[in-house]
Image: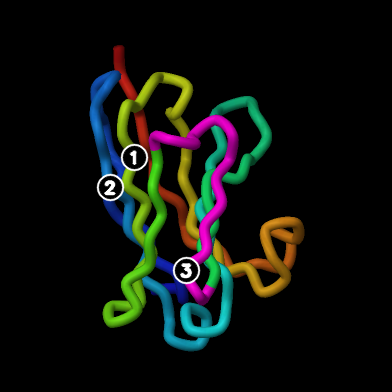
Amino acid sequence: QGPLVESGGGLVQTGGSLRLSCAASESIFSANTMGWFRQAAGKQRELVAIITTDGSTDYGDAVKGRFNISRDNAKRTVNLDMSSLTQEDTGVYSCAGLPYGPQHPGHAWWGQGTQVTVSS
């Protein structure tokens, strides 16, 4: 296993909810802003949400009000709770450790990604 391992993806109907989790190594989790990105087929990767080490959060415009990111320090886990899902939320969701912030994903640690498919 790598330093970031995602779980929780799957198939859900429009309007449904899903939780993604990312288990991180201690060295990455404790020192870095953590984030979720997604990439739909044929589209560029986009930021979904980030959470800093002190718990501050930020969200991509497409998910504001529907998604919630949190971190469980005891379990070294970053969770993404997604609700009111639409087909536009379909994609591969990847967890990232962001030592230089979300503006520099090229320097991030990445998980293997988990597929989320929202059906009509």
Q: Which mark is residue 55?
A: 3
User: Type of residue at label 1?
Assistant: Met
Q: How many numbered circles are shown?
A: 3
Asked if residue 63 lies in the magenta stretch, the reply is: yes
Colour scheme shown? rainbow
Give the extent of the magenta segment.
Answer: 53-66
Answer above or below: position of 86 versus 22: above
**Residue 31 position (above or below residue 107):** below
| Amino acid type shown at disc 2 | Arg
**Is label 1 in a helix, a strand or a loop?**
strand
Residue occupied by mark 1: 82
SS for dot 2: strand
Image coords of residue 72 (percent x, y): 32, 72
Q: Residue at x 47, y 57 (%)?
A: 112
**Disc 1 and disc 2: Cα gap in Å?**
6 Å
In this rendering, which labeled residue sits more in front, label 3 or label 2?
3
Do callouts 3 and 2 mark residues in contact (Cβ within 8 Å)? no
Q: Check disc 2 and report the residue beneath it.
A: 19
